[in-house]
Amino acid sequence: MFLIRLFRFLTGYILFSGSGGFPERFLNLCSQNGISIWDAKSTDGALQAKTNLAGYKKIRLPAKRSGMKIRMVRKCGLPFLLQPYRKRKGILVGILLSAAVLTLLNATVWTISVEGNENFTEEQILDLAESYGIRPGAFKKNIDIKAIREDIKSTVDGINWFSINMNGCHVSLRVSETQGKNEIIDRQTPCNIVSDVDGEVLKLDAYEGTAALQPGSAVTKGDLLIGGVIEKSDGSASFVHARGTAIIRTNRTATSEIPYELPCTVIQEEDIRRSVMLFGIEIPLGLAPAGNTVRSQRACLQYKNTVLPLGIRSEISSYLAEQNLTLSGDAATLLCGFSLFMQEKIIMQNAETESKTISLKQDKNGVCGEIRYINHQKTGIEQFFTVEAE
């Protein structure tokens, strides 16, 4: 029913009224002559109905034969609405251009979102997608989703699964990153386990192979901990892939020296050029900035939670200069502590602290810091060897 009403509105129709005579005969004559009449009703003793443009031209004869007088009440539909503007060509051109622009915009990508990335930044994923033609302003029909997905999975390290979903003019990129390389562990090639630190053996458990040291023994970097050679009672030997756990007491030291006069790089001046971003096209509003370093910032229009492909991109050029920064005693101490903390993160890998001693000293030149650790460190690295057959 809706489609019928829409068709009648687009083609136009006439609302008319008829008085006197015999309305029933009039309707029968219109039906016999193929004249379309609808919404017929009696209003104040007169017949009121609707017909199309061709039907209104033919109802004069049935009206005359049935003794009725026909009068047009109103012209309805799109053709009569546009009739006052038929001489204004600009309106027609504007309507056609609007339809063309809407069709073009509906066929392009407006916005792109990234989900599931952890190791990769959003900018890296967007740059990767752009290298395959997925960017604001790109035509959706030119994006081969299946081919791009398979190519990224097979060529980009660190990505286990990559999906591209289109919802209207929005493209959603979902990334599943690999949690680590699936390394094949070699359990067959003979090897020894040696120490990679200096210290005292606290615990040594050999799962495969022969323990070379006893708890309490001193050890230096490169010394044998677990041997891959097992001597049998008959004097022969077998070679295995040594496995085990070694805990070594180690002495480690972290040091840091922060002078009060610290050389640094400062920004003396900045130059900014802005560009208008419109569906992937950038229109610069000035000359390219010059400077030691250039960074960019983007600000896009947003409707609710949707970022639109319209905005401003700012290129900020910085002029850098080298100069000495004078630190206060508290600032130098804080910076020294931060440096020691960053070293501690490396020292404490695979280790537990038995004790540590912290010392900070200030003199006329700066702040010196030192931390001495006694750690229980899990150690042992594989050292492969070959066996020559006799």
Image (spheres, rainbow, N blue to C red):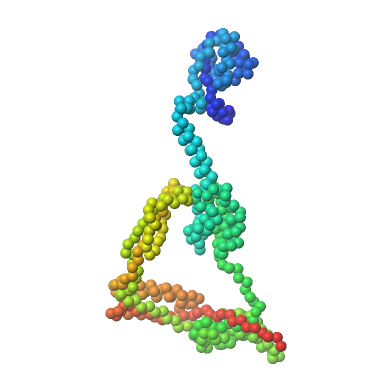
Residue appearing at x 50%, y 83% in the figure: 197
Count every numbered label the image shows and give the total.
0
Location of residue 314 in the rendering, given as x and y in whole percent from the top left corner: 39, 55
Q: Quadrant of residue 242?
A: bottom right
Q: In which quarter of the image is the C terminus?
A: bottom right
Q: Which residue is drawn at 59% across and 9% down?
A: 65
- Residue at the bottom extreme, as displayed: 235
Q: Is residue 334 visible?
A: no
In front of the other: 384 or 377: 384
Residue at 32 percent of width and 64 percent of height? 268
Q: In this view, does 355 lie above or below 316?
A: below
* Whether residue 230 is situated above or below residue 109 in the rendered picture: below
**In which quadrant will I find the N terminus?**
top right
Judged left or right of residue 284, residue 117 is right
Residue nearest the observer in this picture, 97 or 265: 97
Picture coordinates of residue 244 (x, y %)?
A: 59, 80
Residue 77 at what x, y percent from top left? 51, 25
What percent of the width, then of the height, locates residue 121? 48, 60
| Nearer the observer, 193 or 139 | 139
Please determine whether, in this image, residue 310 is positioned above or below residue 177: above
- Quadrant for residue 190, please give it: bottom right
Q: Measuring 46% from the left and 77% from the top, which residue is drawn there?
A: 347
Res 250 seen here = yes
